[in-house]
Image: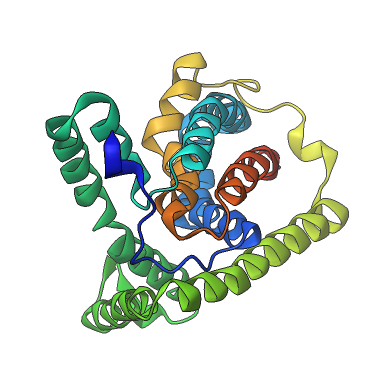
Amino acid sequence: MGNTIQPQARLRRALTSMDFFMLSFTGMVGSGWLFGSLGAAATAGPAAILSWVIAGFLMIFIALSYAEIGGMLPKSGGIVRYPQYTHGGFASFLMGWAYFLSAVTVAPSEAIAAVTYMSSYVPSLMSNGVLTPLGTLVAAVFTVFFFLLNWFGVHVMGKTNTGVGWWKLLIPTLTFILLMGLAMHAVNYAGLPGGFIPYGWSAVFLAIPTTGIAYAYFGFRQGIDYSGEARKPTDVVWAVSVFMVICSTYFCW
């Protein structure tokens, strides 16, 4: 492999283990997680919780493998570079284009998701599930903001992301505690039509790739993608490994 695995000297090594934890955490706790809960419940009914559990168990093996490689070969854009080391440039080229096509949709999809949430308070942003001209303008502003946030460098992005990560951790946790303590009634879970798995086991597994569950869990790649900008390679291993266990439990709430 020669010099291909040498550190990327032009990148600023400014991210700590906490930054990597929050990169992966905010990558998972986003629109996929929130819309996934809605979509999975519609597809699998109450058994959607099993979809989250199964997906989390399977995803841990993938994440831990990437975490180990990320510590050994701390290269930004790792999931594209690793195939280059093992299978050559053409495999890396195909993976790079596939990842690029998926990555360019992230900022617009998150912008649309944000506007969808906002439409609950500002109805003029959406009409019949479609963005209005005003909603499209707001989504475009969000997209530009996301671009600029990354453009100004990894240090600014990493610290901003860490702050957002704590917000994402605090608010859903408090919501869960309040709902469980004040609004949960056991009678609502008794005598469910069709039982706990009303649509069968096929629906449980169908919900994993089609409703946003897999999309949410794959957020762990955020930490791997920035591994070339870690202060210490071990920060990548620690953050991704611990985070996957925590987030798997967090999602299954």
Q: Residue at x 50, y 23 (%)?
A: 204
Q: Tell me the quadrant of the picture where the N terminus can be found.
A: top left
Between 167 and 99, the one lying in front of the other is 99
Q: Residue at x 20, y 44 (%)?
A: 96
Check the image and report above or below for 38 versus 192. below
Between 69 and 64, the one lying in front of the other is 69
Q: Residue at x 26, y 78 (%)?
A: 140
Residue lying furthest top: 201
Check the image and report above or below for 191 versus 82. above
Q: How many marks?
A: 0
From the viewer's perspective, tell me whether residue 159 is left or right of residue 181.
Answer: left
Residue 4 x %, y %:
28, 43
Residue 74 visible in the picture: yes
Residue 135 x %, y %:
29, 78
Between 198 and 116, the one lying in front of the other is 116
From the viewer's perspective, tell me whether residue 42 is left or right of residue 124.
Answer: right
